[in-house]
Image: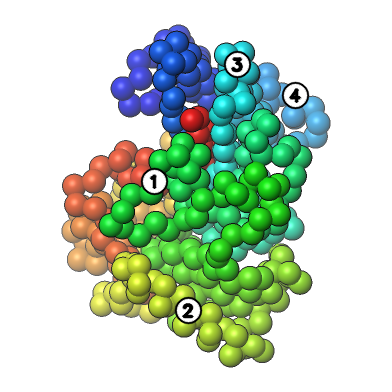
């Protein structure tokens, strides 16, 4: 369901409906001879893993298990949607005047290969490892950006904004910091023209399931991960892209140098940092309770309460009550974590009055951007 979008017919697959809406917008703007920017943020590929049955069946015949087959079918539907948008641009004769960028905001959700597998990269969605943050960044602009080239220069979604503005010959806004860089010269040269940047930062100052707060910096081929519980890890991505060997102890000076740069960049940017949680009690495990909290967002599978009609499983409601036994306090209202005594740190408060729907759109899972100018 998309807020404000009326239903059309029963059983319609959302990813295909998004393509219908996108192509209709393109045709409408083209009829008025208007330049335009269009961002298509597919809800796929994402949980819940729901696919078109006959498409998933095709992948099950290839030997995939049920969840992997559905996931593959969802990817195919995103491919279909993207293909329809590209075909519409070509049909209208504006594909050579159009810059198209396709990317994602995080790596695949990888829970022991379910619903996807990021190997040989380590980790998955939400983690600071390459499986969580290294994603495709595909660019298409016929006649302008050479086709079939591969660039090994790290780029980021923060670069989309200045790239789109330069493409449209629009100056960057003044009086504010611009995080990214324009990729126009880099793209037009097929990757031969470098970027005036040697550092990229990631800042994740809150918990996600079992993943603690962290910040990370990549400088050249060196990558430092600072976990806010006090630990840090260092990797040489040129020799160890799978991040199997932590060099933080063996190369303490290199780790300290990167951490100094990271902390200075966070301070310069006014980044919100996690803070000590005074209610944290180390190693305390609350007694099980039978009350569930239906508003709790996506716990790890092993901690979920049983579904209706099922038995067994650990009661996940322990994560959602307060130490005093009061009714659960929703994080969006207070800015606090669930079950505060089980979290050593507290994250920065969320925006006052922000709804869950607004927050999800701000976070923007699995982003696909089509910039048409």
Earlier along the polypeptide chain: callout 4 or callout 1?
4
Q: Secondary structure at mark 2?
A: helix
Q: Which residue is mark 2?
A: 261
- In the image, 48 versus 228, the foreground residue is 228
Say which label, 2 or 3, has the lower sequence index: 3
State the SS at label 4.
Answer: helix
Disc 4/disc 3 C-alpha distance (Å): 34 Å
Are circles 4 and 1 on residues that touch, CB within 8 Å?
no
Q: What residue sits right under mark 3 in the picture?
A: 93
Question: In the image, what residue occupies the spot 68% across and 19% down?
Answer: 54
Image quarter hosting the N terminus: top left
Q: CA distance from mark 2 to mark 1?
A: 29 Å
Quote the CA–CA distance across marks 1 and 3: 27 Å
**Figure quadrant of residue 320:** bottom left
Picture layout, residue 333 above or below residue 29? below
Which-is-in-front pick, marks 4 and 1? 1
- First reached walking from the N terminus: tag 1 or tag 3: 3
Task: Please tell me whether mark 1 or mark 3 is closer to you in this view.
Answer: 1
Find numbered disc 1 in the image and state the secondary structure of the residue it sits on.
loop
Q: Is residue 283 left or right of residue 54?
A: left
Furthest residue to the right?
62
Determine whether the residue tagged by mark 3 lies in a helix, strand or loop: loop
| Residue linked to disc 4 | 58
Which one is closest to the eye, mark 2 or mark 4? 2
């Amino acid at each position: 369901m998309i807020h404000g979008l009326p239903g059309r017919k029963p059983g319609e697959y959302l990813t295909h409906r998004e393509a219908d809406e996108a192509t209709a917008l393109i045709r409408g703007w083209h009829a008025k001879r208007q330049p335009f920017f269009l961002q298509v943020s597919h809800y796929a590929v994402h949980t819940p893993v729901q696919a078109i049955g006959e498409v998933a069946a095709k992948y099950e015949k290839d030997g995939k298990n049920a969840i992997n087959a559905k996931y593959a079918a969802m990817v195919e539907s995103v491919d279909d949607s993207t293909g329809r948008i590209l075909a519409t641009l070509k049909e209208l004769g504006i594909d050579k005047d159009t810059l198209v960028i396709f990317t994602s905001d995080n790596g695949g959700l990888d829970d022991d290969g379910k619903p996807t597998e990021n190997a040989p990269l380590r980790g998955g969605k939400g983690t600071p490892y390459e499986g969580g943050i290294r994603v495709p960044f595909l660019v298409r602009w016929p006649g302008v950006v050479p086709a079939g080239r591969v660039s090994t220069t790290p780029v980021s979604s923060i670069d989309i904004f200045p790239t789109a503005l330069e493409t449209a010959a629009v100056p960057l806004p003044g009086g504010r910091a611009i995080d990214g860089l324009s990729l126009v010269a880099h793209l037009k040269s097929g990757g031969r023209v470098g970027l005036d940047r040697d550092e990229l930062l990631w800042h994740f100052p809150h918990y996600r399931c079992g993943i603690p707060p962290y910040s990370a910096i990549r400088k050249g081929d060196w990558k430092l991960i600072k976990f806010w519980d006090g630990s840090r890890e260092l990797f040489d991505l040129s020799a160890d892209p799978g991040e199997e060997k932590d060099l933080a102890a063996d190369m303490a000076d290199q780790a300290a140098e990167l951490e100094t740069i990271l902390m200075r960049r966070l301070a310069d940017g006014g980044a919100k940092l996690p803070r000590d949680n005074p209610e944290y009690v180390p190693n305390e495990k609350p007694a099980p309770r039978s009350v569930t909290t239906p508003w709790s967002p996506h716990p790890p599978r092993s901690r979920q309460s049983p579904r209706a009609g099922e038995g067994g499983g650990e009661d996940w409601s322990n994560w959602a009550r307060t130490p005093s036994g009061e009714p659960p306090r929703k994080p969006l209202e207070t800015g606090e974590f669930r079950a505060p005594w089980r979290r050593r740190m507290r994250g920065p408060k969320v925006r006052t009055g922000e709804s869950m729907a607004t927050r999800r759109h701000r976070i923007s899972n699995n982003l696909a951007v089509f910039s048409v100018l």
